[in-house]
Amino acid sequence: MSTLLIWFVFMSLNILLKTGHCTRIRDEILSITPKTEEQVDILKNVSTEYKTVLWQPASAEYIREEMQVHLFVPANSSGTVKDLLKKHHITHEVLLDNANELIELQMRNASSDPRSSSTFYERYHTLEDIYDWINRTAQDNPRTVKAILIGSSYEKRPLYVLKLSFNDRPNKTAMWIDCGIHAREWIAPAFCLWFIHYSLSFYGQNTDITHILNSMDVYILPVLNPDGYKYTWTGSEERMWRKNRSISKATNCIGVDLNRNFDANWCTKGASHNPCSEIYCGEFPESEPESQAVADFLRRHKDTVQLYVSIHSYSQMLLFPYSCTLEEAENHSDLLEMAQEAAQNIRRYYRNTYRYGAGAATIYLAPGGSDDWAYNLGIKYSFTFELQDRGNKGFLLPPSHIAGACNEALLGVKIIALKVIEKTRAPTGHSTI
Ligand code: 0X9
Ligand code: ZN
């Protein structure tokens, strides 16, 4: 009798394993490329009506035929979503099936893993840790680093800009870098910290950064969207949050896409008036305290700031104005040449490909962005970097990739800054008279 029972249990287990009914379904990222208009509509519907999160593109409105779509599908929606895709003959590929492990890995930091051999800059940090780091960095470098409070977020968190200034040369220009306008793009704040640490460590050692810092002050805002960033640290469901956390009067939906809230063809095609959309433009341009603080600061410093850089992820791209119109910027060929040189060097030194071009022509029309707004303000060198990767780990880039992602982007920023210095250098007074 007992032999029979053992045999029965063994056979059942075997069947379960073979049919896969036993394997635990986990959160996944699917890559889907719709081939027809009908498939586009189905996919738009899946990504809005079911409990999924679009990773790429940022919103369903952007989905087109032949576009590679990355969709985060939580375990409990997996069956329904896959059945629907199958029913409409839409094929998919699983990009990631260990999202939860990657989220855990990203959240593991110094305090929870003291044996880790990676440095502070090779880990992701909570907002509190970043605030502490900002204070410490300003305190430890009183001659070169100043923390400037430029405003506060919707939930009243401070927005600190670090000013790096290595000398008081007359007619000094400046560059601006902001990180973390989109909450889930964790590699962005990590880059801002990386850049500051690199500048403080290699000034006087590396010729390029020394030349840059001798010619320009640098204003760096490590976390432009602190409320959103804080929220992404509260759990794996919240990890995919993109917008800020402002409450809309009209609906239950939360958040404005801060990169649609600037006054550059505000809320035209490529942004949405719907507060529930991932690309909600807000009630009016600069309705959000975060974008207003940045815009006010840049308006006050527009005569010195020559270069604007905004750090995002993912997809490895180097974008420049315009994103809010298909028209070319007046210095398009200059911007293209600079982006090309940066991308070529990244390829040469890091064997990684960055696509580059004007935003609207390279990815999609996306009005109300900070880069276009800064450009129209008169900052004629304006770039958005989309850091690693090219679509496997996406927002869940493991800590072990931080160094590579930041170093290649840093090279890109240095090349562009050197070009700006060269192009804007005041003519040396060789008078012909
Ligand atoms: O859509 C965006 O805001 C950026 N891509 S992301 O995937 N990080 O969301 C691209 C920004 C390009 N610039 C402007 N739209 N102005
Ligand atoms: Zn972004």
Image (cartoon, rainbow, N blue to C red):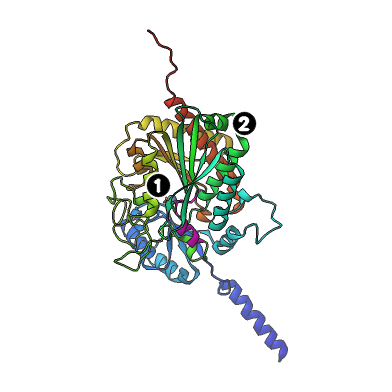
> Which residue matches tag 1?
294
Which quarter of the rendering shows the C terminus?
A: top left
Q: Position of residue 186 (x, y in %)?
A: 52, 53
* Element type where label 1 sits in the image: helix
Q: Position of residue 98 (x, y in %)?
A: 56, 62
Rendered position, 170 above or below 176 = above
- Residue 350's place in the image compared with 81, above or below, is above
Q: Is residue 137 above or below residue 124?
A: above
- Quadrant including the N terminus: bottom right
Q: Which residue is mark 2?
A: 204
Residue 252 position in % (x across, y down)? 34, 69
Q: Is residue 126 visible?
A: no
User: Marks 1 and 2, Cα distance to the nearest angstrom?
Assistant: 30 Å
Q: Residue at the far top: name it.
A: 433
Give the overall secondary structure of the magenta segment: helix
Residue positioned 54% across, 70% down in the render: 25
Nearest to the observer: residue 6 or residue 339: 339
Based on the picture, tell me whether residue 305 belongs to the magenta stretch.
no
Residues packed near mark 2 inside 10 Å, few (<14), some (14 to 19) or many (20 plus) = some
Q: Residue flagged by tag 1: what amino acid is it?
A: Val
Q: Nearer the viewer, residue 265 or 210?
A: 210
Answer yes or no: is residue 119 visible: yes
User: Given contact means CB atoms under 8 Å apart, are the residues at marks 1 and 2 in contact?
Assistant: no
Looking at the rendering, the stretch of residues picked out in magenta corresponds to 222-232
Q: Amino acid at mark 2?
A: Gly
Q: Residues within 10 Å of mark 1 (few under 14, many from 20)?
A: many
Image location (x, y in percent) of residue 295: 37, 45
In primary-sequence order, the first of circles 1 and 2 is 2
Left or right: residue 95 compared with residue 374: right
User: Which is nearer the eye, 32 or 88?
Assistant: 32
